[in-house]
Structure formats: structure tokens, C-alpha cells
Image: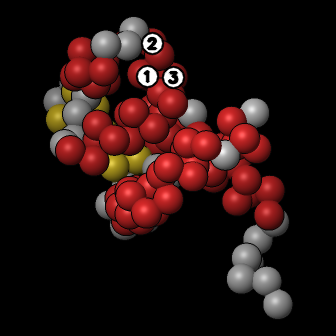
């Protein structure tokens, strides 16, 4: 019996959402504090359109949430699911990072 209660392609897309360097940097920034697009753009050194485009994807897919504060839209990491996942990934990298960096299959 599979532990997955949905089409496996959704799992592939979930990890694809995390596999993009820009989106991952946005998530890591939001793990520190909630921010606006402008604040993230400045913090990461990315064009505002690049941040906005990727945030739209992340919000649509549930990786982040947003709230309005006047004219500002403030983004927050999904603390229920994504924050623990990033912590688990950090622990895994601490244990297996050397092998990850040397894995020829993943480097392709």
C-alpha cells in the first residue's frame, strides 16, 4: 500500500517547486521573517519582477501565505508544512551533504 494518497506527479511538482534556486532563496528568506516583494528584492538582490513571479507560484501552491497591510502585501512562509520541511532538509544536509554534493546522478 502506498503512503501517497494522490497522484505521484503532485509529489514531483511539490519537490520541483523547491528545486528552483530562486524560489528556495525566497523560502529561506521568509523562514527568517515576513516580507514584502520590495523587501525581498532588496534583500536577495533580485529584480522585483523575478521575486513577484516566483512568489505568485509559491503562494498559489501553498508554500507561502500573504496578508494585506494597507497597500502592502506581506508574505509569510507556510509555518505548518514548509518550515518543518526546511528544518528536516537542513538536518539531512548536515548528515549527508558531502554525498549530495558528490552525487553524479543529481548533478546532471
Mark 1–mark 3 Cα distance, whole angstroms, equals 4 Å
Q: Residue reaching furthest top?
A: 47
Q: Residue 50: x and y, percent?
A: 47, 16
Q: Quadrant of the N terminus?
A: bottom right
| Residue 33, visible in the rendered structure | yes
Q: Quadrant of the C terminus?
A: top right
Tag 2 and tag 3, C-beta contact below 8 Å: yes
Against 37, residue 64 (above or below) is below
* Mark 1, residue position: 52
Tag 1 and tag 3, C-beta contact below 8 Å: yes
Mark 2–mark 1 Cα distance, whole angstroms, equals 5 Å
Q: Is residue 56 left or right of residue 103?
A: left
> Under tag 1, what secondary structure?
helix
**30 vs 56, nearest the viewer:** 30
Against 49, residue 65 (above or below) is below
**92 vs 35, nearest the viewer:** 92
**86 vs 100, nearest the viewer:** 100
* Mark 2, residue position: 49
Tag 2 and tag 1, C-beta contact below 8 Å: yes
For mark 3, does the 10 Å Cα neighbourhood hold few (<14), some (14 to 19), or many (20 or more) residues?
A: few
> Under tag 2, what secondary structure?
helix
Residue 6 position by quadrant: bottom right
Mark 2–mark 3 Cα distance, whole angstroms, equals 6 Å
Q: Is residue 14 left or right of residue 47?
A: right
Amino acid at each position: 500500500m502506498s503512503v501517497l494518497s494522490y497522484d505521484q506527479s503532485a509529489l514531483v511538482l511539490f519537490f520541483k517547486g523547491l528545486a528552483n534556486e530562486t524560489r528556495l532563496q525566497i523560502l529561506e528568506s521568509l523562514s527568517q521573517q515576513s516580507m514584502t516583494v520590495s523587501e525581498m528584492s532588496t534583500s536577495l538582490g533580485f529584480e522585483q519582477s523575478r521575486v513577484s513571479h516566483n512568489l505568485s507560484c509559491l503562494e498559489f501552491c501553498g508554500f507561502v501565505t500573504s496578508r494585506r497591510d494597507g497597500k502592502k502585501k506581506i508574505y509569510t512562509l507556510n509555518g505548518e508544512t514548509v518550515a518543518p520541511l526546511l528544518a528536516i532538509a537542513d538536518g539531512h544536509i548536515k548528515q549527508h551533504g558531502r554525498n549530495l554534493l558528490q552525487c553524479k546522478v543529481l548533478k546532471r
